[in-house]
Image (cartoon, coloured by chain):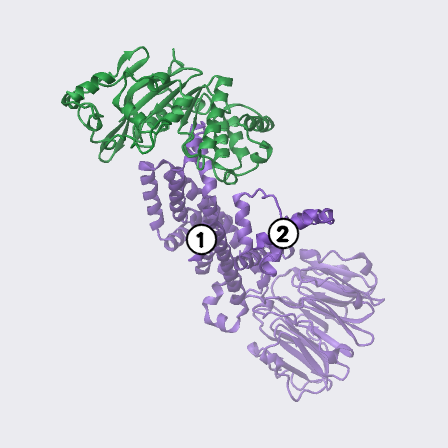
């Protein structure tokens, strides 16, 4: 009926005065039909091609490959799989460029943090009338003009347990996981982590009302009194402090993850490290002139009367490259774990040092600052009117693992490694499989027999035990790169027999066809016949198999790494990121450490399988009639 | 000296049940610019003898003995390298099945060009021009379009023309046409045959024409070799085969009687040769045609006849080559 109707239309067109226009329409229609991507997405999101069938159209030249693509495009499930895989693939190969992975990076202060960006979410009530703020490892504490305490960021139950009888507070300090608060009546309160008695004020400090400065450090608490006395309690094994040299003479104390430095009443800077350290080399020319000081993990900076900054210690991350504009104009200095932030006379703020969490990217609204407060990876600025601006680490998209490493960065870099290993393994296995299958199928007879028996032997080798044995024998003596290459090769060399058998069967069928004899009669050589005439006829089957093989290689690599025999830490793969979840505490408490890699792995595998199935259906449309 | 000559060729196949002597002492010659027609039933060894020339035998087939002389060179002895240079270049083949003789995944262009690029060191551009030219030679309309098409888009006649174009691409001295028109309908068949004849007169190609269609043989061949059970039973110029038949092989006679003629009365039954070709592993003693021959004598079943020249350029493998004589024999 349709053909009839179209014929009528055609006749009518030919006799119609609008014939010219109709022709134009026809050519336009042709053009529309050639937009492959347009149709691709149309097919994906708007269902079947709803385009009117063109009335007359010369049959376009369609290669078998193109036919497969067209068939594939109409398969919605497979297209979804393709889109998902392409997204994962792009994420794994582009994002690592934007978020480079430093395999050696570890951060004890950032362990097992849940996903979220709450670390700089200053409570609304504090935003307009802040008095003082201090940043802890993953949380911050602040007080407003009324002395009310606010806590935000990643808080555990102990941190949330602010003492109910807390009086108005005049000074706060945040440590790794505990806080110190100085009440307006001069008494000290502390809460948070209860290890090393950090949640208790020691008897020597209890009842004193002359406390001038409080410093909650890395598992340590320090207090300076008006009289220059210094009290230290907490994990004194970790933080090496010798208080004797300065006792009774302390003006200000700063601490970092290893030690503390003191500014004395006579404007001297003294390293309190009990052991020899880089901080001991205090520059002599500043002694007696120091007014403020700050310490990162490996370097210290001092502000002298003339507003100049002097830095000593390690040179990592450019902490010693002091910007010129701060010299002579600085009024206060603060430090994070590896950056310095200074306040200038005119209220401007300058940061330098490590910028891995944008802690030195001072925002425009931080101008006109009255005071600066930096710690760990965060910076807060309180302006004249009590409003707050902040920059630095806001949080982690997918949390952090037990070494304080960002799960997201590891996930994308791990994906790249996982996929690279899978891809190279598949390429190796496909090459071997096609070569052996090709020769076996084409030559048949004895060669076939030998090669297929060989394939059966290889196929019978149990993969996981062999990989484990090889990995433990060879693995520890070679570099990480070689180890990874070894895994690729083992994976590739052991997974070809299936493909070889498939290619052999296909070639056995193809070589009996006349075109092979015809090619031979044309004087084309055997190798060329196998690989340039027969193989293209079976390449579709190979593509499908390779795709599915890729998925299984991803899984095998992941299981190897999960068991600890594949890629080992610190190089991430989806498999070894899951290693941690062998412990039930991780599964229960730190869900983000296993949910994201598991999700990525399963999504990638499922989407690749969908692609493979879709390709198979596209190549052999009969297969989905079953 | 002939261009191509088969001398006492024996081609055998190893099978699980024994050696099959598919070609058992065949000799024929193909002259430049002439056509030799080879006729016979299926399994008579006509294709195998032709495929032996280019050593295109299946894995279990081998040339047991005999010579294949091409311009004086024995093709059974030359190394494989030289064989590759001869295939498609000096001797080429047209196959029976145009539907499957072209690689389905490549365009015509690629397949045609490959022949040029295999045998002649020509640039891609020159190969393309030559491809267009060769398609014009086999009278394919708009060759530029056809070149970009895939085999499945073309009709059987078109594909066979392309096969011919490919076979003639390097201007071979000998063209082996293995039942080139069997799969085509009669009108296309006539076109293809005309085309082959024209190309032969233009280029002086020798054609070895294998068929079971005697009509086609009469059209095409200059001389005819009739094969039965791996042996040539009659060899004669085409005029003698289809002529007065004073002397002929009973098998040839049977073949000719089994095709309808214009002067055949309606309602008259055509005479078929009784029985079927004997199994190659179980050949009869004596004359191999004897079990099916209506003139066979006990003598025939004992003694194997040799191929004897009964007239100039006319040899017959029969103890009673004279038609009249054997008629009388059977009457007595």
SS for tag 1?
helix
- Residue B169, disc: none
Measured as percent of width and height from the top left, residue A478 is found at: 47, 48
Crowd band around label 2 with a 10 angstrom C-alpha radius: few (<14), some (14–19), many (20+): few
Q: Is residue B90 left or right of residue B227?
A: right
SS for tag 2?
helix
Measured as percent of width and height from the top left, residue B252 is found at: 29, 23
Nearer to the camera, A22 or A242: A22
**The quadrant where residue A73 appears:** bottom right
Q: Is residue A361 left or right of residue A81?
A: right
The residue singled out by tag 1 in the image is: A622
Measured as percent of width and height from the top left, residue A540 is found at: 48, 46
Q: Is residue A476 left or right of residue A328?
A: left
Tell me which chain appears purple: A
Q: Are marks 1 and 2 on the same chain?
A: yes
Q: Colour of chain B?
A: green
Asked whether the viewer can see residue A182, the reply is yes
Nearer to the camera, B205 or A620: B205
Measured as percent of width and height from the top left, residue A239 is found at: 60, 69
Q: Mark 1 or mark 2: which comes first in sequence?
A: 2
In the picture as drawn, the residue positioned furthest to the bottom comes out as A165
Q: Image point 60% across, 33% down: which residue?
A: B144
> Compared to A23, does A219 lie above or below?
below
**The quadrant where residue A322 appears:** bottom right
Q: Image point 63% across, 66% down: which residue?
A: A273
Nearer to the camera, B209 or A522: B209
3D distance between C-alphas at marks 1 and 2: 35 Å
**Which chain's residue wears label 1?**
A
The residue singled out by tag 2 in the image is: A8
Label 1 vs label 2, nearer the camera: 2
> Compared to A194, does A109 lie above or below?
above
């Amino acid at each position: 009926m349709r053909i009839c109707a179209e014929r009528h239309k055609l006749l009518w067109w030919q006799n119609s005065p609008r014939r010219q226009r109709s022709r134009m329409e026809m050519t336009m229609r042709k053009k529309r039909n050639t937009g492959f991507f347009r149709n691709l997405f149309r097919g994906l999101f708007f269902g079947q091609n709803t385009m009117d069938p063109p009335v007359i159209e010369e049959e376009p030249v369609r290669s078998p490959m193109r036919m497969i693509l067209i068939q594939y495009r109409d398969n919605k499930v497979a297209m979804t799989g393709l889109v998902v895989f392409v997204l994962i693939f792009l994420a794994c190969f582009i994002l690592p460029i934007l978020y480079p992975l430093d395999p050696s990076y570890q951060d004890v202060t950032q362990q097992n943090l849940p996903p979220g960006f709450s670390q700089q979410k200053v409570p609304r009530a504090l935003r307009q009338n802040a008095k003082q703020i201090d940043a802890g490892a993953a949380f911050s504490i602040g007080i407003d003009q009324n002395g009310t305490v606010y806590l935000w960021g990643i808080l555990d139950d102990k941190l949330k347990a602010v003492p109910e009888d807390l009086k108005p507070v005049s000074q706060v300090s945040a440590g790794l996981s505990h806080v110190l608060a100085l009440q307006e009546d001069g008494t000290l309160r502390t809460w948070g982590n209860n290890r090393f008695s950090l949640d208790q004020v020691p008897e020597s400090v209890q009842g004193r009302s002359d406390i001038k400065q409080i410093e909650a450090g890395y598992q340590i608490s320090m207090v300076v009194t008006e009289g220059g006395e210094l009290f230290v309690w907490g994990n004194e094994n970790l933080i090496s402090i010798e208080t004797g040299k300065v006792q009774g003479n302390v003006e200000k104390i700063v601490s970092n993850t290893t030690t503390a430095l003191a500014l004395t009443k006579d404007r001297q800077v003294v390293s309190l490290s009990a052991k020899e350290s880089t901080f001991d080399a205090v520059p002599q020319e500043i002694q007696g002139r120091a007014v403020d000081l700050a310490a990162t993990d490996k370097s210290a900076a001092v502000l002298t009367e003339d507003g100049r900054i002097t830095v000593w210690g390690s040179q990592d991350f450019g902490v010693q490259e002091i910007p010129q504009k701060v010299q002579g104009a600085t009024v206060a200095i603060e430090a994070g774990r590896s950056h310095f932030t200074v306040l200038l006379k005119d209220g401007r703020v300058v940061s330098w040092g490590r910028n891995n969490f944008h802690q030195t990217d001072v925002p425009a609204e931080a101008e006109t600052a009255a005071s600066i407060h930096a710690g760990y990876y965060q910076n807060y600025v309180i302006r004249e009117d009590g409003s707050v601006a902040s920059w630095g680490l806001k949080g982690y998209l997918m949390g952090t693992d037990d070494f304080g490493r960002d799960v997201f960065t590891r996930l994308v870099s791990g994906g790249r490694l996982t996929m690279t290993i899978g891809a190279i393994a598949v390429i190796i296995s496909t090459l071997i499989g096609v070569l052996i299958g090709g020769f076996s199928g084409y030559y048949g007879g004895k060669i076939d027999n030998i090669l297929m028996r060989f394939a059966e032997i290889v196929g019978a080798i149990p993969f996981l035990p062999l990989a484990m044995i090889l990995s433990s024998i060879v693995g520890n003596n070679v570099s990480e790169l070689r180890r990874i290459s070894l895994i690729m090769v083992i994976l590739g060399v052991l997974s070809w027999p299936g493909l070889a058998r498939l290619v052999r069967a296909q070639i056995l069928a193809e070589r009996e066809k006349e075109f092979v004899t015809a090619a031979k009669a044309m004087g084309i050589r055997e190798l060329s016949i196998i690989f340039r005439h027969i193989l293209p006829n079976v390449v579709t089957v190979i593509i499908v198999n390779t795709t599915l093989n890729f998925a299984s290689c991803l899984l095998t690599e992941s299981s190897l790494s999960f068991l600890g025999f594949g890629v080992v830490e610190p190089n991430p793969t989806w498999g070894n990121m899951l290693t941690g979840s062998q412990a039930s505490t991780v599964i229960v408490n730190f869900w983000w450490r296993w949910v994201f890699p598991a999700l990525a792995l399963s999504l990638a595998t499922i989407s690749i399988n969908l692609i493979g199935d879709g390709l198979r259906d596209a190549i052999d449309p009969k297969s989905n009639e079953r | 000296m002939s261009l191509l000559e088969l001398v006492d060729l024996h081609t055998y196949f190893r099978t699980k049940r024994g050696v099959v002597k598919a070609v058992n002492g065949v000799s024929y010659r193909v002259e430049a610019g002439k056509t030799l027609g080879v006729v016979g039933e299926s399994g008579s060894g006509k294709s195998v003898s032709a495929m032996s020339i280019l050593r295109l035998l299946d894995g279990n087939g081998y040339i047991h003995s005999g010579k294949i002389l091409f311009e004086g060179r024995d093709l059974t002895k030359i190394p494989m390298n030289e064989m590759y240079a001869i295939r498609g270049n000096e001797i080429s083949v047209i196959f029976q099945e145009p539907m499957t003789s072209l690689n389905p995944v490549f365009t015509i262009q690629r397949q045609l060009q490959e022949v040029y690029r295999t045998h002649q060191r020509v640039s891609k551009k020159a190969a393309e021009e030559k491809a267009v030219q060769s398609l014009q030679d086999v009278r394919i309309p708009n060759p530029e379009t056809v070149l970009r098409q895939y085999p499945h888009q073309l009709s059987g006649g078109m594909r066979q023309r392309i096969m011919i174009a490919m076979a003639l691409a390097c201007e071979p001295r000998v063209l082996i046409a293995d039942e080139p028109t069997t799969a085509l309908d009669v009108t296309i068949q006539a076109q293809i045959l005309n085309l082959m004849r024209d190309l032969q007169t233009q280029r002086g190609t020798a054609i070895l024409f294998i068929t079971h269609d005697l009509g086609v043989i009469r059209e095409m061949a200059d001389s005819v070799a009739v094969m039965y059970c791996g042996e040539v039973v009659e060899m004669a110029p085409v005029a003698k085969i289809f002529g007065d038949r004073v002397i002929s092989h009973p098998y040839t006679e049977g073949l000719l009687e089994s095709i309808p003629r214009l002067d055949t009365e309606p309602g008259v039954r055509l005479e078929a040769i009784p029985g079927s070709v004997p199994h190659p592993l179980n050949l009869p003693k004596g004359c191999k045609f004897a079990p099916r021959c209506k003139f066979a004598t006990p003598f025939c079943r004992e003694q194997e006849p040799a191929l004897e020249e009964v007239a100039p350029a006319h040899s017959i493998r029969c103890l009673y080559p004279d038609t009249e004589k054997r008629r009388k024999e059977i009457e007595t």
